[in-house]
Image: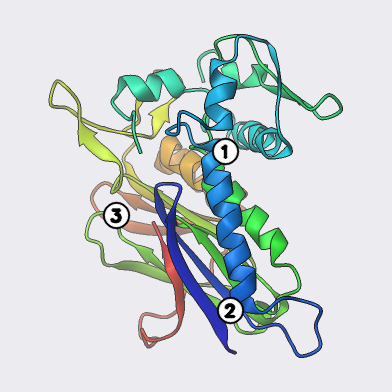
Amino acid sequence: MREHDLTFDAMGSHVRLLIGEPPAGADLPAAAEAAAGARRFVQDFDAALSRFRPGSELCALNEDPRERVPASPLLRRAVRAGVEAAELSGGLVDPTLVGEIERVGYVDSRADSRWRQLAVDEEAGEVLRPVGLRFDTGGSGKGLAADLVAARLRGYPRFVVDCGGDIRIGGAGALTWPYEVFVEHPLSGARAHLIRLGFGGIATSGLNVRIWRDAEGRYVHHLLDPATGEPAWTGLVGATALGDTALEAETRAKAALLSGAVEGRRVLAEKGGLVVHDDGTVETVGPIALVPASAPEELEPAEAAA
């Protein structure tokens, strides 16, 4: 099946789109045109919802002195996604830890359950939160973007939307000809596993990216324990999760990594996934379709989930 393949930079990472050509007679734009439209959407999403862009709508929300702030449909959906991620993870994926993540040094490109104070009034078109409570799309943004692009591609026979490793796969053709997703080992960079997937989301959270030394020389990273506001060291260095959507997969992956091995297995058990222990051991969990190690590597993979 012929597919259009487009890669570009957005949201501080690489975005890749694979879109199968629509069947003859279908009332759909060509795959290249659909990809161009999806690219514009992702770039607009990034411009509106990045906390690293002073002129973004998200920064305007965080600086607004009112408790009720008028917000675009996109920002309202992003806030709902952040709350959904917090609810699914029991507060481990908390979209209100902006101050804490800035304090550990990530300032550019569960204790008090502050996320429970976020709300969206769709009828009024407003976001509600206590004055001074800041919101960040970091825990849910790429997954949400992948899902919103996938919605735009409904009707195409086969597609992948990869937003920085948060991947959404769809199309009737992918059910009979699944994609094979390369999962990178966070310590070695080698292939941890190859996963066959024909529908839904897959995402990886790991300590191999966004890790640095703070002013005292300590290693720190961007995945914080909400109970302490400090980087979480749980005995896991990576987790990959499946989900019905990219947002769900992203949330489950982060929750598993932040939970540690025992609770992480429970988080992944229903939809499937894998964890990587800090000694490098890879452990699969729940229902997951692995490609045999002897499978030829030239099988078409989606972008590595990392």
Q: Is residue 191 above or below residue 221?
A: below
Q: Nearer the viewer, residue 298 or 232?
A: 298
Mark nearest the camera among 3 and 1 is 1
Q: Nearer the viewer, residue 288 or 91?
A: 91
Residue type of the residue flagged with mark 1: Ala
Residue 48 badge: 1
Residue lying farthest to the right in this orientation: 123
Q: Is residue 50 left or right of residue 210?
A: right
Residue type of the residue flagged with mark 2: Pro
Please tell me which residue is depicted at 81% across the width and 88% down the height of the picture.
25
The answer to whether residue 244 is seen in the rendering is no
Mark nearest the camera among 1 and 2 is 1
- Residue under label 3, please give it: 186
Q: Secondary structure at mark 3?
A: loop
| Residue 76: percent from left, percent from top | 70, 33
Q: Secondary structure at mark 1?
A: helix
Q: Is residue 129 above or below residue 41?
A: above
Instruction: Estimate how packed mark 2 is, as few (under 14), some (14 to 19) or many (20 or more) residues with alpha carbons within 10 Å.
Output: many
What colour scheme does the image use?
rainbow
Count of marks placed on residues: 3
Instruction: Estimate how packed mark 1 is, as few (under 14), some (14 to 19) or many (20 or more) residues with alpha carbons within 10 Å.
Output: some
Q: Quadrant of the N terminus?
A: bottom right
Residue type of the residue flagged with mark 3: Pro
